[in-house]
Image (cartoon, helix red, strand yellow):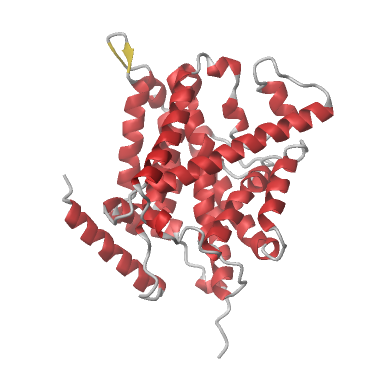
Amino acid sequence: MIDPKTAEVAAEAAVSVSQKASGSAASKPRIAVWDNARFVLIALVVIGHTISTVRTDSDFAFGLYAYIYLFHMPAMILLSGMFSRTEVNAKAFRGVVQLIVLWLVWEGIWAILNFWVEGRPLGKNFLVSPAWTLWFIVTLVTMRILLPYIARLRHPLMFSIAIALIAGLSPEIGSQFSASRTLCFFPFFVAGWLIRDRGVLDGAWFMSPARAARATGWALLGAIGIAFLLVPQLRSEWRIDKWLTWRDSYGWLFANAPLGDWKPSEWFAISGGGIVVAASLLLLAGAMTLALLLVVPRRASVITVWGSRTLFVYLLHGPVVWVLRETGSIAAINSLTIGPISVGVPVMILGAVVLTMLLSMTWVTRAFKPIIEPSVDWMLQRPSH
């Protein structure tokens, strides 16, 4: 067991070291709630990817997968937006360049893995369609580039919402350069920037929420979770998981993942229905994101330190889960039972949480820093004096 006081001291010391390394001012310390939220969300990412290939094998796995995918990436993108700026200065430019280099490095890593294990050469979609988890990096790059321009609009959030809903009308907007996901998730990035820029969450109502506020947050998260787990035959009535990938047009989604008997065929019906469904899912994701932020701990602890290292977990867990899939380990775990009770999914959840913690360790960040935080200073001009 980790002593809470020791963990808190360790967390604060790690934050202090991080500030010195990044040149942060002492007057602007890291706020624990954001890193705590990041750790919870990255754990959900790892769980979601771990059960992804077996999600349709049981109602529990499907409900859990849909629940996670409803809000975990929107919430991560909102947090990314909170710490983005509209100023196009040397620091912002360096951050974008580093993300681009990071993307290219990991495209190379995935290309090597695919060739080494499967003998798969580079295809025509190399770099065009980001490899598995790398869509998030490409999306962050695009959003950071777009934000300074969108921020100049009178109503940037409304504009981004309109673009997100319109994106599903075109079958040409897909996974290439993560275009569809970028447009669909952009409202959360813009909302995150607005929240931080205007101090929406700086008040005591959020930083020290009352019990009633926390209870409301837990009630919302719990009610939606119970609904997903108890709705009979959800996976046969509505493949909501296909909608929650946010990479396909409304026409394709209604054709391949209709809502029960609702399968419109006319363009106007498809467009109107798609916009209604997408708007509802985005609204639900926003509500769940706020609920999560209300219930996560405010005090610094060991997960605060781990939450500052989510990029390491995000990129490194992919090859681990991929190997488990390719070797049949996930399928084998999924078939585990104790008597008549299937325990495969709970075991995978536990394993995913343990993997998240392991990849958050200090030795991991030190060992893999060159490929997670590649140096780009050699590429940039030195500031003139």
292 relative to 301 in the view: left or right: right
Seen at 77% across and 21% down, the residue is: 264
Seen at 70% across and 40% down, the residue is: 174
350 relative to 48 in the view: left or right: left
Seen at 62% across and 72% down, the residue is: 88
Percent x, y for residue 364? 32, 53
Vertical position of residue 34 compared to residue 268: above or below: below
Percent x, y for residue 102? 52, 57
Vertical position of residue 34 compared to residue 66: above or below: below
Residue at the bottom extreme, as displayed: 385
One can see residue 51 in this view: no
Q: How many marks?
A: 0
Pick the residue in front: 339 or 364: 339
Quarter-of-image position of residue 251:
top right
Percent x, y for residue 184? 65, 44
Vertical position of residue 157 compared to residue 352: above or below: below
Image quadrant where one finds the N terminus: top left
Percent x, y for residue 90? 57, 75
Quarter-of-image position of residue 340:
top left
Residue at the top extreme, as displayed: 340
Image quadrant where one finds the C terminus: bottom right
Pick the residue in front: 172 or 239: 239
Pick the residue in front: 278 or 168: 278
100 relative to 201 in the view: left or right: right
One can see residue 361 in this view: yes
